[in-house]
């Protein structure tokens, strides 16, 4: 979503404005002890969101990306921290109230094996009419859409999917100057680093891939057969099953404890100390590798090494 952009100024007292006319405006100069690291990073990140961009949402846009449940918006802890600074809400409150578990199937391993993500609930609670209340600190996925899909050559593929056929910004691709294209690739690289950092902090490894095959019977209950005798399981049923199992066990209790720590100075400083380490891991090729999957044993996860 594109709206009028606020400014980031005054190194002694950074003020984040969601957009002109927004009710959300918060001064964050004295809130945390990690100011120099986190605020500086988020200020640069926010400026990069619009750097050399010629894109703006068409007047005919109905904000489907903000409201359509079938369009999944994966977010990182960096996204939540950014939103927290603008909204004045705790990271733990945002995590528990406005996020949900997402399940992204790995196509080469079948529909029941997939990556666990944290996603925004729909409709987005930060949508105020046609404006975004946290625009400067919006999730990276929102800032990249739709321009990143064009520079990656995915525009035509998206239009073949029914969910994207009502997006006017995809019907009429915008111009992307060379400097903006360079910035978009920089933001995509930042996305990889932020997601990796989030996974390492929350789960201790990246990615978290769960095998739900032994729960398939529970997921298929009540699903009608099609005319050819096959079952088509709605994605939200898989996510509901995942949430029911994962969030009732000790693993998720530990995850929520780690998120709670981000509301405290010590926890946030620990998170920021982890960032240069995870950045270096990615630089050295020690990043995301799917070496293990985790099926459920009751409400616990048991790792199984992939044989490939």
Image (cartoon, helix red, strand yellow):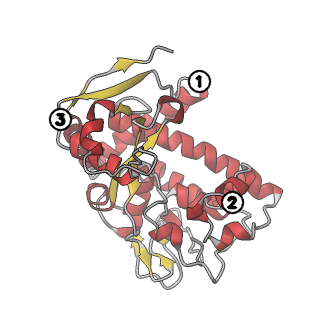
CB-based contact (under 8 Å), mark 3 and mark 1: no
Q: Is residue 274 visible?
A: yes
Q: Is residue 29 visible?
A: no
* Residue highlighted by disc 3: 250
- Local SS, label 2: helix
Image x and y of residue 77, in percent: 40, 49
Mark pair 3, 1: CA separation: 31 Å
| Residue for point 55% across, 41% down | 192
Query: Which quadrant is home to the N terminus?
Result: bottom right
Residue at image mark 2? 147
Element type where label 3 sits in the image: helix
Q: CA distance from mark 2 to mark 1?
A: 27 Å
Residue 218 in which image quadrant? top left
User: Which numbered disc, 3 or 1, marks the residue closer to the eye?
Assistant: 3
Q: Is residue 302 above or below residue 11?
A: above
- Which residue is denoted by mark 1 in the rendering? 285
Where residue 287 sits in the image (x, y, percent)? 52, 28
Q: Position of residue 233 (x, y in %)?
A: 38, 48
């Amino acid at each position: 979503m594109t709206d009028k952009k606020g400014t980031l100024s005054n190194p002694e007292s950074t003020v984040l404005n969601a957009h002109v006319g927004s009710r959300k405006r918060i001064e964050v100069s004295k809130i945390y002890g990690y100011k120099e690291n986190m605020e500086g990073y988020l200020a640069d990140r926010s400026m990069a969101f619009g750097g050399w961009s010629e894109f703006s949402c068409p007047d005919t846009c109905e904000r489907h990306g903000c409201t359509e449940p079938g369009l999944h918006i994966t977010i990182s802890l960096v996204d939540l921290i950014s939103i927290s600074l603008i909204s004045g809400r705790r990271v733990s409150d945002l995590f528990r109230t406005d996020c949900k578990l997402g399940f992204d199937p790995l196509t080469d391993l079948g529909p029941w094996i997939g990556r666990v993500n944290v996603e925004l609930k729909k409709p987005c609670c930060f949508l105020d009419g046609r404006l975004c209340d946290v625009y400067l600190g919006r999730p990276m996925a929102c800032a990249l859409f739709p321009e990143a899909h064009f520079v990656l050559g995915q525009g035509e593929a998206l239009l073949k999917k029914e969910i994207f056929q009502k997006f006017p910004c995809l019907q009429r691709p915008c111009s992307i100057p060379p400097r903006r294209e360079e910035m978009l690739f920089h933001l995509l690289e930042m996305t990889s680093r932020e997601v990796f950092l989030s996974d390492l902090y929350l789960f201790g490894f990246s990615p978290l891939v769960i095998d739900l095959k032994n729960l398939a019977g529970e997921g298929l209950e009540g699903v009608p057969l099609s005319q050819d005798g096959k079952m088509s399981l709605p994605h939200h049923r898989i996510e509901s099953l995942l949430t029911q199992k994962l969030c009732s066990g000790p693993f998720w209790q530990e995850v929520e404890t780690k998120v709670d720590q981000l509301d405290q100075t010590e926890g946030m400083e620990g998170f920021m100390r982890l960032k240069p380490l995870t950045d270096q891991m990615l630089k050295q090729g020690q990043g995301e590798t799917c070496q293990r999957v985790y099926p459920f044993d009751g409400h616990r996860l048991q790792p199984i090494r992939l044989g490939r």
